[in-house]
Amino acid sequence: MIAFYNGEFLPIEKISISPFDRGFLFADGVYEALRTYNKKLFMLQKHLERLKYSLEQINLNFSEFNQLENIIYRCAELNSLDTDFSTYIQITRGVSFPRTHYYSNQIKPNLFVFVSPLKNRGREINEGVSVTLEQDVRWSRCDIKSIALLPNVLANHKAISEGHYEAVLFRDNFITEGSHTNFFAVKNDSIITAPLSNYILNGVTRSIIFNLCEENNIQIIEEYILLDEIFTYDEFFLTGTTTEITPVVKIGNRMVGDGKPGKLTRKIQKLFYEFVRKH
Amino acid sequence: MIAFYNGEFLPIEKISISPFDRGFLFADGVYEALRTYNKKLFMLQKHLERLKYSLEQINLNFSEFNQLENIIYRCAELNSLDTDFSTYIQITRGVSFPRTHYYSNQIKPNLFVFVSPLKNRGREINEGVSVTLEQDVRWSRCDIKSIALLPNVLANHKAISEGHYEAVLFRDNFITEGSHTNFFAVKNDSIITAPLSNYILNGVTRSIIFNLCEENNIQIIEEYILLDEIFTYDEFFLTGTTTEITPVVKIGNRMVGDGKPGKLTRKIQKLFYEFVRKH
């Protein structure tokens, strides 16, 4: 596999990260994950805007946004990817020595980009998945897409180890989002999801759903889904760049409805793929 | 500089971390920092116990604890360090591909160790330092010494940029600890510090102080120092492996007492160095 690191396209095993990269020592960096449809990067501008936001929030100076699109397509070409693919962009603050929490503004950020073929998720999309509910122990700046993902790793790993697809997280009685997805519920023909705040990521797919609902007169409400009322909702789904719109048909060991993707979830999926075709 | 990485002692620039090391992509790892006194590692067993605890909490299998002492002394030797030094041990979950939050239990952890000469902190220890108060936005498992340190970096960087030595963190009205230190107050001849919980690190120096207080009939109380009562306390100090017992003489732009290290803080410093000499 060929990936990009600081100006060079290299076989992955030739890419050498310094142990004093602040990404390795302090999780001092941010990332984005995108995908293509019809071999074209989907919602690139939205992802770049969010990347800028994350960088600003952690005061990391990076300016080579204009090069990212070319880097990604060139990576795909060098790996002879002739199908749709996902891509990952990570920017860390750079290498500094000695190890101190404090950093100099003079250090040069490190850019790492790779592409991967997308795996087929037809089954999850069509049949839905099972999720587990876990306490949200993450920091309170989940609006920043940082690489400090250990809590997400622990929650997702536990979920998958127990046979689920994703961990859906709650703070007190409020459901925030999944470990790498946004979480939606349906009740009385309205769609409900957590409001934007420092506790959730401003998902690109999430924002598309808001637009689709407005255009199609589907009521969508930003309010917390309540943990202790979770089984009073009619349908659930997860969203994300590679997750797309994935129905949730089981929570813990309890079936949602008849265990099949809900009607409004299906409608949102349909509207989403129509939107994809037009973009 | 020679450091240790996965079985080899190498010049730092020859150490190559894979971009798929989960430490680099997910902050999926833990660390310890120790120091020597009289060229002997101080409280090694306590640090190794805490390292084991951190590893267990994130379900990371590592068993080569017995080798660490030799690795550290050999590093010091190879760098011709003939003074006291600090050392850093980092264990990440290892390299895995493709990038998924979920990990296999089969991957081999990566061990990185380096040593550095200690810088002279006589001035901070003798004259005290200034701290700023910042909101604690960290995750709620601060008892794990993980490398997901971005919030600590942001808080500490802000503090230092504004001319302080450390950021002291609060959740609601409760002071937890510093960005890389524990925080203590003195009131009516009693010492007060946050109780052990998931919100603070179980500091090795913190635990020494508890023992010293017991042995010397100094009352020490585990309770939260309250943010809105901060200026009703008489003295403050920070503790940590390299911080030792550092008096706090200024909080924000407000002097503590007469701006000099407090009497009980001085006594704790004295007892601490006596303890050090005996160990």
Image (spheres, coloured by chain):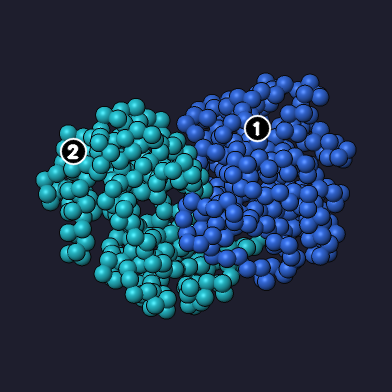
Chain colours: A blue, B cyan
Check disc 1: other Cα within 10 Å, few if <14, some if 14-19, many if 20+. Answer: many
Locate residue A77 relative to residue B191 in the image: left or right: right
In the rendered image, residue B176, in percent from the top left (x then y), is placed at: 36, 39
Query: In which image quadrant can residue A143 be found?
Result: top right
- Tell me the mark number nearer the camera, choosing from 1 and 2: 2
Q: If the image is split into quadrants, where does the C terminus of chain A sit? A: top right
Left or right of B183 on screen, residue B111: right
Q: Is residue B78 above or below residue A253?
A: below
Q: Residues within 10 Å of mark 2 (few under 14, many from 20)?
A: some
Question: Any mark on residue B222, and which?
Answer: none
Residue drawn at x 85%, y 52% is: A39
Residue lying at 66% horizontally and 40% vertically, measured from the top left: A53
Disc sitting over residue B190 in the figure: 2
With B87 as the anchor, is A216 left or right in this view? right
**In the image shown, does A11 or A232 lie closer to the viewer?**
A11
Question: Where in the figure is residue A57, as x and y percent of width and height?
Answer: 60, 40
Task: From the viewer's perspective, tell me whether residue A104 is left or right of residue A46.
Answer: left
Evaluate whether residue B174 shows in this view: no
For marks 1 and 2, give the CA distance.
51 Å
Q: Secondary structure at mark 1?
A: strand
Instruction: Indicate the amino acid at tag 1.
Output: Phe
**Residue at the right extreme of this rendering:** A278
**Residue that label 1 marks:** A184
Quarter of image, res A9: bottom right
Q: Quadrant of the N terminus of chain A?
A: bottom right
Of all chains, the one bearing label 2 is B
Tag 1, which chain?
A
Q: Amino acid at mark 2?
A: Ser
Q: In the rendered image of this protein, does residue A104 appear above or below residue B171?
A: below
- Is residue B187 shown to the viewer in this render? yes
